[in-house]
Image (spheres, rainbow, N blue to C red):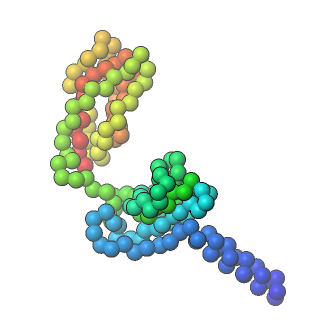
């Protein structure tokens, strides 16, 4: 019986230690907050801390620390949940489009003209948020090298890529 009690106490202590870096919080209603819960995850003494959450991805709702919270450097999300390091302390919410999340500001849906090129015949990327229903068109080829969609230029939701000397003027038809 003593061994079972010690095991129960040890399991309880580990549960409390794991939760020490995470504080759940029900946010007030208003823009920028999800209807669900948020979690504060904090790196203490510069150490990496993991905060288990039931989400598929996370976003920062509020940075609390003076230390920078930069995704991929001082915080991230993986199968284990949110991790924070190097003094990052922030309030996180589920990322995504359902039940809250980010929505574009007024006049976000518009056309953007962008010059993008492949310097020294190498792969280049010009970052612009195309949106989930957007499209990119080549308006004018600016290089001698051919600009052929799918071969020497293309696009994804994050922007326009060019390769093998293609330089062009692109129209980003940004749509949410």
Q: Is 112 left, or right, of 121 in this rendering?
A: left
Residue 138, image quadrant: top left
Spot the residue most to the top.
Answer: 144
Q: Nearer the viewer, residue 2 or 137?
A: 2
Q: Nearer the viewer, residue 139 or 126?
A: 126
Report x, y in % for residue 126.
Answer: 35, 32
Query: Residue at point 19% right, 38% down?
Result: 111
Report x, y in % for residue 129.
Answer: 31, 42
Report x, y in % for residue 101.
Answer: 33, 60
Report x, y in % for residue 37.
Answer: 41, 71
Q: Quadrant of the N terminus?
A: bottom right
Residue 124, image quadrant: top left
Q: Is 60 left, or right, of 11 in this rendering?
A: left
The answer to whether any part of residue 80 appears in the image is no
Spot the residue most to the bottom.
Answer: 1
* Rendered position, 65 above or below 141: below
């Amino acid at each position: 019986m003593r061994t079972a009690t010690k095991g129960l106490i040890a399991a309880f202590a580990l549960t409390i230690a794991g939760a020490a870096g995470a504080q759940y919080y029900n946010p007030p209603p208003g823009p920028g907050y999800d209807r669900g819960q948020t979690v504060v995850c904090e790196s203490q003494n510069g150490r990496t801390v993991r905060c288990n959450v039931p989400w598929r991805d996370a976003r920062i709702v509020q940075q609390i620390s003076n230390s920078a919270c930069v995704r991929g450097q001082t915080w991230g999300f993986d199968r284990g949940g949110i991790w924070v390091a190097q003094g990052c302390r922030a309030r996180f919410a589920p990322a995504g489009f359902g039940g809250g999340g980010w929505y574009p500001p007024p006049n976000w849906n518009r056309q953007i003209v962008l010059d993008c090129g492949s310097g020294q015949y190498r792969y280049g990327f010009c970052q612009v948020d195309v949106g989930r229903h957007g499209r990119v068109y080549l308006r004018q080829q600016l290089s001698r090298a051919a600009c052929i969609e799918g071969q020497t230029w293309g696009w994804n939701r994050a922007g326009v890529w060019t390769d093998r000397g293609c330089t062009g003027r692109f129209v980003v038809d940004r749509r949410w």
